[in-house]
Image (cartoon, helix red, strand yellow):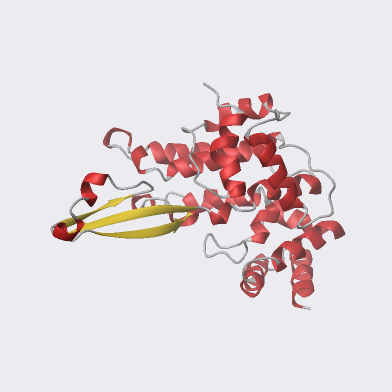
């Protein structure tokens, strides 16, 4: 059954925009993502949809002078589905004995959904995507480890059962909570399977979001076609400069841009990239 916009809005988009706990839907996949995007060309009113509209407009006005912002386009819906499924890739319940390859299969499906979304075609679409996904690096999964006098157990992204918390003094029970960022959510057994590459691809399809978090720890910022395309117009250059300067750590972001620009070597795109660096450092 194809999920609808209201479900995705309630459980993923609004918590992402406003803060709160995300409750990802079961894996959607590229075909159902396309069906959802085609069916939801016009967002219905009411419920979480109106709150999503308000938050997106508020974010967009921080970087551009806008009176209104259109509803999510098909590409945004597909990127929202891809994010939902990327979170599900990190879900330890997918790592059962009989379906141990399921996360790898799902990650390949996420890549296909991203490809289906395609990059933004115009600057307004890039602004809209950033308005929806600007807080993606605020996502954290809380893992809780319960220690007691004869052992310990870790609960990934869920609260421990009350039975383990009883008789705290007698059993010497203590809790340790760890906030895990999105890039580190994939299980350690999943290393080398391309999780960061897919995350980088997802980011490149919302290029202003990519630049706005150039100071991130991982995945390292790198220039891509969609991100570089912003620099070929004056308006795009101005927006790129604005979001980089609004990074949590602008100096670190500029350093990351410098490394990415050096990696371009003699590529023709190095000219616009160096131009942005000069404007940021000037």
Viewer-closest of 141 and 115: 141
Residue 238: which quarter of the image?
Answer: bottom right
Q: Residue at x 42, y 46 (%)?
A: 90
Q: Residue at x 81, y 57 (%)?
A: 236
Query: Is 13 left, or right, of 266 in this rendering?
Result: left
- Pick out the residue farthest to the top: 1
Query: Is 106 left, or right, of 57 in this rendering?
Result: left
Is there any visible trace of residue 260 in the rendered image?
yes
Query: Is 27 left, or right, of 15 in this rendering?
Result: left
Q: Residue at x 29, y 47 (%)?
A: 160
Question: Is 199 placed above or below 103 here?
Answer: below
Q: x%, y% of residue 265?
A: 68, 68
Question: Is 85 placed above or below 147 here?
Answer: above
Viewer-closest of 107 and 72: 72
Question: Is 266 placed above or below 282 here?
Answer: above
Q: x%, y% of residue 129?
A: 70, 46
Viewer-closest of 12 and 269: 12
Viewer-closest of 84 and 279: 84
Is there any visible trace of residue 225 in the rendered image?
no
Q: x%, y% of residue 38?
A: 68, 26
Marker count (numbered):
0
In the picture, the quarter occupied by the C terminus is bottom right
């Amino acid at each position: 059954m194809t999920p609808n916009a209201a479900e995705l809005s309630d459980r993923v988009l609004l918590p992402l925009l406003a803060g709160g706990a995300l409750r990802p839907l079961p894996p959607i996949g590229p075909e159902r993502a396309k069906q959802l995007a085609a069916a939801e060309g016009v967002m219905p009113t009411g419920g979480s949809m109106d709150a999503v509209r308000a938050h997106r407009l508020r974010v967009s006005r921080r970087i551009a002078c806008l009176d209104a912002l259109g509803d999510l386009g098909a590409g945004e819906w597909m990127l929202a589905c891809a994010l939902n499924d990327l979170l599900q890739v990190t879900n330890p319940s997918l790592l059962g004995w009989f379906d141990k390859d399921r996360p790898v299969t799902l990650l390949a499906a996420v890549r296909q959904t991203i490809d289906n979304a395609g990059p933004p075609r115009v600057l307004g679409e890039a602004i809209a995507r950033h308005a929806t996904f600007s807080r993606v690096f605020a996502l954290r999964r809380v893992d809780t480890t319960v220690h007691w006098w004869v052992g310990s157990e870790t609960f990934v992204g869920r609260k421990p059962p009350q039975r383990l918390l009883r008789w705290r003094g007698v059993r010497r029970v203590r809790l340790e909570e760890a906030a895990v960022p999105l890039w580190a959510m994939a299980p350690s057994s999943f290393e080398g399977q391309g999780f960061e590459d897919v995350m980088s691809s997802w980011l490149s399809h919302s290029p202003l979001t990519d630049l706005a978090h150039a100071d991130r720890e991982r995945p390292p910022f790198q220039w891509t076609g969609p991100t570089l395309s912003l620099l070929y117009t004056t308006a795009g250059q101005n927006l790129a400069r604005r979001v980089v300067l609004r990074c949590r750590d602008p100096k670190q972001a500029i350093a990351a841009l410098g490394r990415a620009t050096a990696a371009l070597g003699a590529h023709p795109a190095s000219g616009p990239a160096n131009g942005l660096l000069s404007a940021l450092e000037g």
